[in-house]
């Protein structure tokens, strides 16, 4: 049973891509603040941030944030109800954007490997948006 109003769903699906576009804006800001030969690495690092954020959020972050319990013996097996899909998409967008902000703070200070493995990356479960 869908308990969310259609306007809530429309709002979430309309604003989530704008949040994801902020990641591109932060990537452009970061590329503008580094030396020219590091600009490509900056965009690669931000693309890796997006991929890792989607994997971590789909793997355990969303389930951790919204207390989803799996009945499967596999700890990462959980399913979304139809009404939760837009909330998952918004969660992924917030997670990816927050990871990009952290990587911008480390511009030209770490390698790509060091940035993706750094422990100060925002945890996927830390950005609950409701």
Image (tube, rainbow, N blue to C red):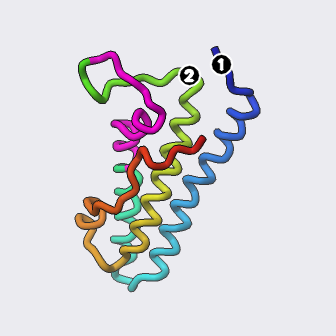
Q: Residue at x 52, y 62 (%)?
A: 24
Q: CA distance from mark 2 to mark 1?
A: 8 Å
Q: Residue at x 52, y 48 (%)?
A: 93
Q: Quadrant of residue 12?
A: top right
Q: Residue at x 40, y 56 (%)?
A: 122
Where is residue 43 shown, x and y percent of the image? 40, 66
> Is residue 29 or residue 123 the one in the foreground?
123
How many labels were placed on the picture?
2
The span picked out in magenta is 53-72
Q: Which residue is mark 1?
A: 2
Q: Quadrant of the N terminus?
A: top right
Question: Does the stretch in magenta take in 66?
Answer: yes
Viewer-nearest of discs 2 and 1: 1
Q: Quadrant of the C terminus?
A: top right
Question: Does the stretch in magenta take in 61?
Answer: yes
**50 to 32, vertically: above or below:** above
Is label 2 in contact with label 1 (beta carbons under 8 Å)? yes
């Amino acid at each position: 049973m869908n308990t969310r109003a259609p306007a809530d769903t429309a709002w979430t699906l309309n604003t989530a891509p704008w949040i994801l576009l902020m990641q591109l804006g932060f990537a452009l800001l970061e590329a503008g603040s580094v030396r020219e030969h590091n600009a490509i690495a900056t965009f690669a690092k931000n693309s890796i941030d997006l991929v890792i954020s989607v994997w971590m959020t789909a793997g355990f972050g969303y389930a951790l944030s919204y207390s989803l319990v799996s009945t499967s013996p596999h700890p990462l097996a959980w399913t979304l109800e139809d009404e939760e899909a837009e909330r998952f998409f918004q969660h992924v967008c917030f997670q990816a954007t927050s990871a990009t902000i952290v990587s911008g703070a480390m511009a030209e200070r770490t390698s790509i490997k060091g940035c993706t493995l750094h422990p100060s990356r925002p945890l996927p479960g830390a950005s609950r948006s409701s």
